Amino acid sequence: MLGGLVTTIILLSLVISLVLYHKKNHQLDRVDFHRNQVLGENGIEFLIACVFLLWLIPWGTIIIVPVAFLISVISPAGRESWKQFAKIRAYLISAIILATVAGGFIPASKPISPVEWGEPLLKKNPNAPIYPSGNQYTWVMLPSDNSLNVEIVQSLTLRLPYQFAKFGAASSALDLADILSLHDSRLKQAVGLLDEEIVLNLDPDEMKLIEIKTADKHLFVDVSSNLDYNLDVRLYELRSLTLSSDSDGIKVGEVVCVASSSWGGELDLLVVVRPIGHIGLNQDKFAEGLTVEWISSK
């Protein structure tokens, strides 16, 4: 939550500083001052409300900025106000968007690390993008019978700079990851580790994810504590482009993504990569046991 609070304070400080700057100038000129002289009628109040809406509205800035602009120009009075205050509004909105984006560099928390899994094999991913801020732990779960039931498990905590609300944060993050193909770079590490354990000769740079249509949420039940968790999920086919002449490649495994959001703009993400032939691909699509251990350790 700390990252969201820091960004909120910065955003409110920008607005307050602008008002105080204008007030001081008016006082020096011995002219009466009213806050409506800064951004137009109710402009300051409207802007502060938008900042607080980052804690309430799913998709945050992505929704708030265009909707706020539409509301501000929908009436003749609003359009006239834009003519008078366009320059200062443009500067302030740009500064607020820049500060919000910069909030994505605030360090994220440590990933969820269940004690049952032991110490992570890796605590960094050199292929991970530098933005937004994130941390990642990786485990290799090996079967005792030398079968193909290998699992590459990754626990991530990522900064979500565009919203601080918990509502809808997990689903919006997964949707954005699909739209922008954000999974691909982080997946290379897992594919490389999987290739070390099986004999398919996978090339981490020549892989493709194809989403498997399924429900966006899944109910995970912790039998030991009698608790259940309704979490956002995505399921993908992992396809190799080098083992087949088909443009979509050939299926070599599946990837499960499970997400849980927190207040303040952070996302906890569990990624489980399993090869073709893994028993769970038919019997345990969403890696129930691993997910329950992971989410119950949050």
Image (spheres, helix red, strand yellow):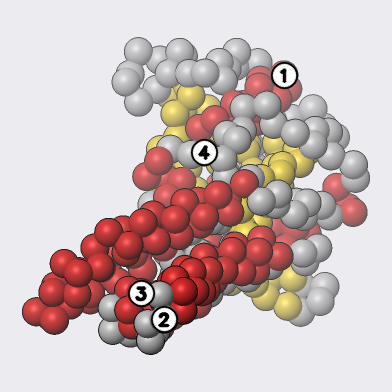
Q: How many residues crowd mark 3 within 10 Å: few (<14), some (14–19), many (20+)?
A: many
Circle 1 sits on which residue? 196
| Mark 4 residue type | His
- Which is more N-terminal, label 3 or label 2? 2
Earlier along the polypeptide chain: callout 2 or callout 1? 2
Q: Secondary structure at mark 3?
A: helix
Gap between marks 2 and 3 measured at Cα: 16 Å
Of tags 3 and 1, which is closer to the observer? 3
Tell me: residue 129, above or below residue 17. Answer: above
Mark 3 or mark 4, which has the lower sequence index?
Answer: 3
In percent of width and height, residue 120 lies at 84, 39
Please provide percent x and percent y for residue 266. 63, 59
* Residue where numbered disc 2 is placed: 30
Kindly identify the residue that appears in the image at 66 percent across and 45 percent down: 134
Type of amino acid under label 3: Val
Image quadrant assignment for residue 33 = bottom left
Residue denoted by label 3 = 38
x, y (%) of residue 218? 54, 65
Residue 199 appearing in the image: yes
Marks 4 and 2, the one that precedes in the sequence: 2
SS state under label 2: loop
> Which residue in the protein does label 4 denote?
183
